Image: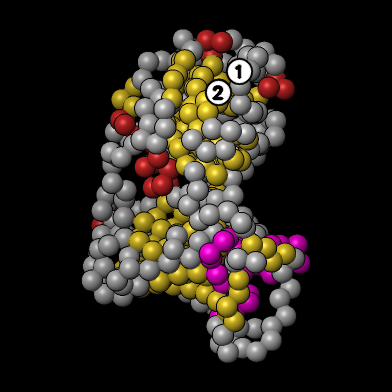
Amino acid sequence: MSGHFRIGAVGLLSLTMAVVAASNSASYAALIGFEAESGASATTSVSTTLGSDFIPALNDNGALGGQYLTRSGNGGLTTPDFASNVLSYDVTFAEAGEYDLYARILFEVDGSDDSFYYGNGFGAKDPLASADWVRPNGLPDAGFPAATYFWINLSENIGAFASGTATTFTVDSPGVQTIQFGGREDGLYFDAFAFGAAADTFTDQQLNQAVTTTFTPPNEWALTGGGVYNTAGNWTDNVVPTFDALFASSLEQDAEISLDNPSRSLNSVTFNNSNFQYTLAGPNALTLVAGAQVSTTGTHVITANVAGSVGLNKLGAGSLVLDGAKSYTGATHVQAGTLQINDLDAIDNQASRALDIGAGAAVDLTTGAA
């Protein structure tokens, strides 16, 4: 198999994982994205038909391209009901394959306007047929934040109170496919959509760049050395990240970041520095929610406890060192690069859980792992 364990000086090990699997997919597979309000895209060609229930594009500096779509009025609907309440996109796919559907959305601060519809497969859908639609709902209960734009993989996560079944999308041959969305609540903003190979996981930055090459630089660690996470002045936007954290090129030395907030829950952590090493340390835990992504360029370390119930997705060509035991549960997916552990309790090795190693990726068990 193409993914593999590289075992150091520990002798024979008995792994109690339920599954040790290797994906046959490439680390970087097909990814296309487009603006909700116009179909504009950096990666594909899209033609749009926007229902008249949707307000003309509104301006917002936080949206990709500076604009978003929202519905006029609350429907409380069990289906989209009318063609006027449907967004339709004819999307060109250059590659056949199985794709996940992503959406970049925002729902307003009280978290109640978080539901909408998407077609449960390609093609034009009947606005009155509930069997044609999936309804994401209850996103705050699944760990997604109010009042901020975020990417959600709708093929894997449709919230705590959804109707229908999350689905992937099959492209049998290159060409044009139609995807449709329906509105339900006026406090939900549609910013962008994307399709990515179902066997792979993508960072927010990759998804953004599939839509447009011009977007607001992300909030990132601003110091040249270490410090405490929960200080606004340590971040470029003077705002402490509450969903996605980026540790990039500011360092001039190896540095330790202390997790000083006992309730720090993050969808993604990205380390993007090949020259110096970040270490995320306690005293508190890093709790992974939603996408549970940790992406690395270079080699970076987490000595703090990693908590959460949705597993861990390792992305990026670099190395992630999980130092010591961790308490998170769920499957561990090593999509790219190397995951290094020195304690088998660093990953969830309950009998019901899987360790999935992508093509070209690896897991290193270092001296003393037991």
Q: Quadrant of the N terminus?
A: bottom right
**Label 2 residue SS:** strand
**Where is residue 314 shown, x and y percent of the image?**
52, 61
Provide the residue designation for mark 2: 178
The residue stretch that appears in magenta = 341-363
**Where is residue 261 shown, x and y percent of the image?**
43, 61
Tell me the quarter of the picture where residue 349 sits. bottom right
Q: Quadrant of the C terminus?
A: bottom right
Q: Is residue 141 above or below residue 70?
A: below
Disc 2 residue type (three-letter): Thr
Residue 223 is left or right of residue 365, and the answer is: left
Provide the residue designation for mark 1: 124
- Calculate the distance from the C-alpha at mark 2 to the C-alpha at mark 1: 7 Å
Tell me the number on the disc at residue 191.
none
Mark 1 crowdedness (10 Å alpha carbons): few <14, some 14-19, many ≥20: some
Residue at coordinates 29% horizontally, 71% vertically from top-left? Answer: 275
> Is there a contact, CB below 8 Å, between mark 2 and mark 1?
yes
Tell me the quarter of the picture where residue 225 sits. bottom left
Tell me the quarter of the picture where residue 21 sits. bottom right
Q: Mark 2 or 1 closer to N-term? A: 1
Disc 1 residue type (three-letter): Ala
Q: Is any part of residue 109 visible from this angle?
A: no
Q: Is residue 173 above or below residue 225?
A: above
**Where is residue 209 shown, x and y percent of the image?**
36, 42
In reply to whether residue 356 is colored magenta, the answer given is yes
Q: Is residue 184 above or below residue 297?
A: above
In reply to whether residue 102 is colored magenta, the answer given is no
Residue at coordinates 59% horizontally, 81% vertically from top-left? Answer: 7
**Where is residue 224 shown, x and y percent of the image?**
23, 67
Residue at coordinates 61% horizontally, 88% vertically from top-left? Answer: 10
